[in-house]
Image (spheres, rainbow, N blue to C red):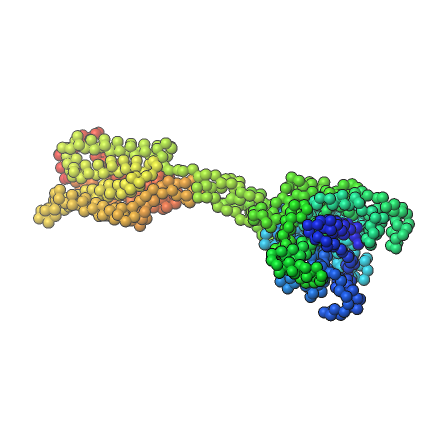
């Protein structure tokens, strides 16, 4: 028997004494108990279980061959294997069995074994708690140590999928060899240390250990000293022990009487242990102070415990002493002086489970004896007083119990026959004298809300002094900083990765993310790509230099056009003004004036009115201007041809022809614009995608096809005008504007042909600037090429502006 487990026996005795002194539970009934030690052997477990059922040692299964003992229930089974072996026999006779260890789901089969109850939650809850603990501290690269037996196999099968599902990898898995599988202890140690050295070199600073205290007690004595007390500094450096966090499952207790003289408990300083939820029971510590070998009649374990706990020898003991130098036991030693690894004065989780198990059986027995609902029940009670109650009649009552223990906590079973409780998370703090204390730092409570099921108080945890950083890290590689994301390494586990900078337009705000994410539509990543910055709304405004420049040019050309118009109006009766259709000149100048002014609509923040008007106004006005140029060109050609006697074109001369050309050509553009506005009109739009750092306030054209139809028709008129003017360029100079119109149309077509690719490649306000520039350049080309020669003659060479000069030039 391990010294620390002696508290389990004392918890059982303490509960029995309390119940026997309490008349409210079992009045006039005294509980007794008998303790068997299975010695961690399957055959002995079966033997002692059958011995509980039958007085005789001649065992015939399923046949009562002797006087049956007055058995009410069985408490036992710290190890899952032990409980399952006991269950095989006790379940046949429906004997209530209450196990006090935590077990995997494969053992916790309440449907097939309804008399089997457990004073601990299912291990699945514990595994969830461990995973939440790992996630809380960001430990993604962990090692596993378990026994090389059926329990270890079940642990790996149930626990490892939980790790991978939560993005946690196992750096290594070490199975502790079973003694029976090796020819000698030396061979076993050699095998284990060969596997152990690999994980001691690992970057995994967190190690989860699962197993059973009864199975690993020999391990601490034979192996841990070799692992954690290296013989040389080089061996210590090679093992790289500093920075390991040990996480123990509830089945493991930090125990061993084998190593008390050689093993340094500082190894486990700062470790984290999951334990069955325990609460301090009033009177238990006072009860422990009354325990002495001389006063413990009928206790077959106390002498062995006393010798091992106090390193003394009893002259009357049948057990040989470990050393001849050990002093004799006085019997006056005090339990509180024993270091915690070997005995604890506070009730442990397993002892607390045994204490509650005794009360559960007592309350179930009490409830069965407390039927007072009717006369028949009272009659049944009197009948029970004269007849013995069979054990199989009791197990169904256990499922129904619900009571508060002396610590003030409710004890009840769920539908799976498990105690409706959780696990405590404790931090082990060790001291130089090999003692330690447990500090409760969290819990796993299945009754709490989902977001409160796991709680941890990080500030209460004391970490090992070798840690450079607290909480320590346990990662395959360093975390990726904000602004980068993980990039998988080929051939490695998913927890091992490289860090790649986020691509343009994406960012990573947190550490160690799998993917970079895009910012919201109205934001963009900063230079470091670790957070988003609000985009700036932008448009071509009157306040910025580009807007001021374009607006100034538009006003300048408008003023120049107005001055040219004023000059032509003032000299309207001169031959040079009258010679080339004065009315068409006025229409052209007015159209150019309006074209320059319509550029101002493109500048400023777009709204419904400006978006609705600007493209339509530009298209119609420019079409009128180009139509006027075309009319002037056709007029020149017709006038020259009509000057020949008998030519049929003579009757076409006059205002009717020019107005018809202007109106018909302009009407087609008006029709296109009407269809555009009636179907898919332009509207203001927030463009969040064209520029990364800006929200462009722009006018959406509504229908791109109709927009290019407006430009295309205007280009068609310009092409026709250019063609006609080019063909008429050789006519006599006195009547001919064709040369000037040819140059003006060449400039016009060049501007708008280069407009299309430039417009498509520009973004935001620069698209608007390209269109304004094209309007100004083409309008200035028309104004300069057509009117500058005439203004030169009118203003600077008035001597050439007379009828005789025109006739002479004609001749």
Please state which of residues 27 and 489 is positioned toward the viewer in this rendering: 27
User: Is residue 98 visible to the viewer in this orientation of the structure?
Assistant: yes
Percent position (x, y) of residue 13?
76, 51
Quadrant for the N terminus, please.
bottom right
Q: Of residues 268 and 41, which is closer to you in this image?
A: 41
Count of picture labels: 0
Quick one: 369 or 142, which is closer to the camera? Answer: 369
Q: Quadrant of the C terminus?
A: top left
Which residue sits at x=22%, y=36%?
589
Residue 76 location (% of width, % of height): 73, 57
Q: Is residue 233 visible?
A: no
Left or right for 16, reference 756: right
**Residue 592 figure quarter:** top left
Rendered residue at 64%/50% (across/down) = 403
Q: Residue furthest left?
A: 646
Residue 75: percent from left, percent from top: 72, 56
> For this rendering, which residue is in front, 628 or 488?
488
Residue 703 at what x, y percent from top left?
31, 48
Q: Residue at x 71, y 65 (%)?
A: 89
Look at 67% across and 43% down and name the residue there. 440
Q: Is residue 414 above or below residue 479?
A: below
Q: Give the side of residue 119 with respect to residue 555, left or right.
A: right
């Amino acid at each position: 028997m391990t010294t620390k487990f002696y508290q389990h026996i004392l918890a059982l005795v303490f509960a029995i004494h309390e119940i026997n002194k309490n008349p409210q539970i079992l009045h006039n009934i005294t509980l007794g108990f008998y303790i068997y030690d299975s010695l961690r052997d399957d055959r002995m477990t079966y033997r002692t279980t059958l011995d509980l059922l039958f007085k005789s040692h001649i065992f015939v299964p399923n046949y009562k061959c002797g006087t049956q003992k007055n058995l009410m229930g069985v408490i036992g089974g710290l190890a899952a294997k032990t409980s399952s072996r006991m269950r095989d026999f006790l379940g046949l006779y429906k004997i209530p069995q209450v196990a006090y260890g935590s077990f995997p789901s494969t053992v916790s089969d309440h449907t097939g074994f309804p008399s089997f109850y457990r004073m601990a939650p299912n291990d699945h809850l514990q595994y969830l708690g461990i995973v939440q603990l790992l996630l809380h501290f960001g430990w993604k690269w962990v090692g596993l140590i378990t026994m090389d037996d059926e329990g270890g196999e079940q642990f790996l099968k149930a626990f490892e999928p939980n790790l991978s599902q939560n993005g946690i990898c196992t750096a290594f898995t070490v199975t502790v060899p079973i003694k029976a599988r090796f020819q000698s202890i030396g061979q076993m140690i050699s095998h284990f240390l060969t596997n152990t050295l690999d994980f001691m070199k690992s970057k995994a600073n967190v190690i989860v250990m699962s197993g059973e205290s009864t199975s690993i007690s020999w391990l601490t004595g034979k192996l841990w000293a070799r692992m954690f007390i290296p013989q040389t500094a080089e061996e210590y450096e090679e093992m790289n022990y500093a920075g390991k966090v040990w996480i123990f499952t509830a089945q493991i207790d930090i125990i061993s009487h084998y190593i008390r003289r050689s093993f340094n408990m500082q190894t486990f300083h700062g470790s984290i242990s999951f334990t069955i939820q325990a609460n301090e029971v009033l009177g238990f510590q006072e009860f422990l102070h009354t325990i002495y070998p001389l006063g413990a009649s009928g206790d077959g374990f106390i002498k062995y415990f006393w010798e091992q706990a106090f390193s003394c020898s009893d002259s009357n003991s049948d057990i040989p002493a470990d050393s001849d130098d050990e002093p004799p036991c006085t019997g006056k030693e005090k339990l509180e002086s024993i270091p915690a690894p070997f005995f604890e004065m506070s009730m442990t989780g397993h002892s607390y489970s045994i204490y509650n198990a005794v009360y559960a059986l007592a309350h179930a027995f009490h409830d069965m004896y407390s039927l007072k609902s009717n006369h028949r029940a009272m009659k049944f009670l009197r009948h029970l007083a004269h007849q013995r109650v069979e054990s199989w009649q009791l197990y169904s009552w256990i499922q129904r119990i619900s009571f508060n223990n002396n610590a003030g906590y409710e004890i009840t079973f769920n539908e799976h026959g498990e105690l409706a409780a959780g696990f405590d998370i404790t931090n082990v703090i060790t001291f130089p004298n090999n003692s330690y204390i447990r500090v409760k730092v969290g819990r796993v409570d299945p009754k709490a809300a989902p977001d409160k099921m796991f709680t941890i108080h990080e500030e209460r945890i004391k970490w090992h002094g070798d840690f450079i950083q607290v909480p320590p890290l346990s990662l395959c590689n360093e975390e990726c900083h904000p602004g980068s994301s993980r990039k998988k390494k080929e051939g490695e586990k998913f927890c091992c990765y490289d860090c790649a900078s986020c691509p343009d337009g994406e960012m990573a705000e947190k550490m160690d993310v799998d993917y970079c994410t895009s910012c919201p539509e109205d934001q963009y990543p900063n230079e470091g790509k670790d957070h988003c910055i609000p985009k700036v709304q932008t448009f071509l405004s009157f306040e910025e230099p580009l807007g001021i420049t374009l607006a100034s040019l538009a006003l300048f050309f408008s003023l120049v056009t107005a001055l040219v118009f004023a000059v032509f109006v003032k000299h309207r009766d001169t031959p040079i003004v009258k010679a080339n259709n004065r009315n068409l000149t006025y229409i052209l100048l007015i159209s150019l004036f309006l074209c320059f002014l319509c550029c101002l609509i493109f500048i400023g923040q777009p709204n419904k009115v400006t978006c609705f008007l600007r493209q339509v106004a530009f298209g119609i006005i420019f079409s009128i201007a180009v139509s006027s140029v075309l009319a002037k060109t056709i007029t020149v050609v017709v006038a020259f041809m009509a000057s020949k006697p008998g030519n049929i074109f003579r009757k076409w001369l006059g205002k009717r022809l020019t107005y018809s050309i202007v109106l018909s050509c302009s009407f087609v553009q008006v029709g296109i614009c009407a269809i555009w506005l009636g179907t898919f009109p332009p509207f203001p739009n927030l463009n969040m995608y064209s520029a990364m750092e800006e929200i462009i306030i722009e006018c959406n054209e509504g229908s791109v096809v109709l927009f290019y139809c407006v430009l295309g028709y205007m280009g068609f008129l310009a092409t026709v005008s250019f063609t006609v003017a080019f063909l008429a360029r050789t006519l006599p100079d006195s009547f001919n504007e064709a040369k000037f119109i040819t140059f003006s149309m060449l400039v016009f077509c060049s501007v708008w042909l280069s407009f299309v690719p430039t417009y498509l490649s520009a973004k935001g306000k620069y698209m608007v600037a390209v269109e304004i520039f094209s309007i100004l350049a083409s309008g200035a080309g028309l104004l300069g090429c057509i009117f500058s020669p005439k203004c030169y003659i009118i203003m600077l060479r008035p001597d050439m502006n007379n009828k005789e000069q025109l006739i002479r030039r004609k001749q």
